[in-house]
Image: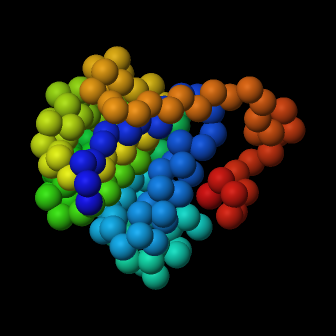
Amino acid sequence: MELGQFQVYTGDGKGKTTAALGLAVRAAGAGLRVFIGQFMKAGGTSELEPFGKLGITVEQFGSDRGLLLGREAEREDVACASAGMERILWALERFDLVIADEINCALMCGLLNEGDLLRVIDARPASTELVFTGRGASPAILQQADLVTEMRCVKHYFADKGLCARKGIEE
């Protein structure tokens, strides 16, 4: 691949992971080697089903206790995120596109520190495309990025209509 870039998809709106996964499909279609590391996620979702058929490698770095919604982070959560950091560093040397999904949220929740994320950015080979997703990207991360897309919630049916996550659309 030509010169890789560092992209960040952040903000409070829907679509950060979806945008990154769309990029993964496009890259795989072009014959690039793709790695997706999902922080704070464990268990199957519909988005993972087709990736094996496309040759996309996906690993999850969330504890069996699930998302941190309404609970404090525990040692197991921190250990999973730390293991995820090592896998992302490993992937940088082996894949053309590396997506660290929800890594910004892992930082916000205290599972990682800013130095961990900056270490990944610094370790990126010039030919590797790197993508961070998740709400709350720090100013230092945004400063390092070549592309920043901020998803802004204008209207959302979760709040407006009380809808829950729907299989195939949000999960």
Identify the image's colour scheme: rainbow, by chain, secondary structure or one colour: rainbow
Quadrant of the snapshot with the C terminus: bottom right
Q: For the view shown, which residue lies furthest in the bottom direction? A: 53
Rendering coords of residue 146 (x, y %) = 34, 32
In the rendered view of the protein, which quadrant contains the N terminus? bottom left
| Along the viewing direction, whichever of 6 and 119 lies nearer the viewer | 6
Specify the farthest residue to the front.
2
Point 33% across, 30% down: residue:
145
Seen from this angle, which residue lies furthest top? 139
158 left or right, relative to 87: right
Count the labels in the image: 0
161 relative to 23 in the view: left or right: right
Name the residue rendered at 40%, 27% in the picture.
137
Task: Using the image, determine if residue 46 lies above or below residue 86.
Answer: below
Residue at figure coordinates x 52%, y 37% from the top left = 69
Q: Is residue 23 visible?
A: yes
The image shows residue 28 at horizontal and vertical percentages of 41, 69
Judging depth in this view, the residue of 68 and 142 nearest the camera is 142
Residue lying at 69% horizontally and 63% vertically, measured from the top left: 167
Left or right of 34 in this view: 91: left
Judged left or right of residue 150, residue 132 is left
The answer to whether residue 39 of the structure is visible from this angle is no
From the top left corner, tell me how far across and down residue 110 is, in percent.
31, 29
Give residue 7's position: percent from left, percent from top.
38, 39
Name the outermost residue toward the right: 161
Q: Is residue 63 above or below residue 94?
A: above
Foreground residue, 118 or 61? 118
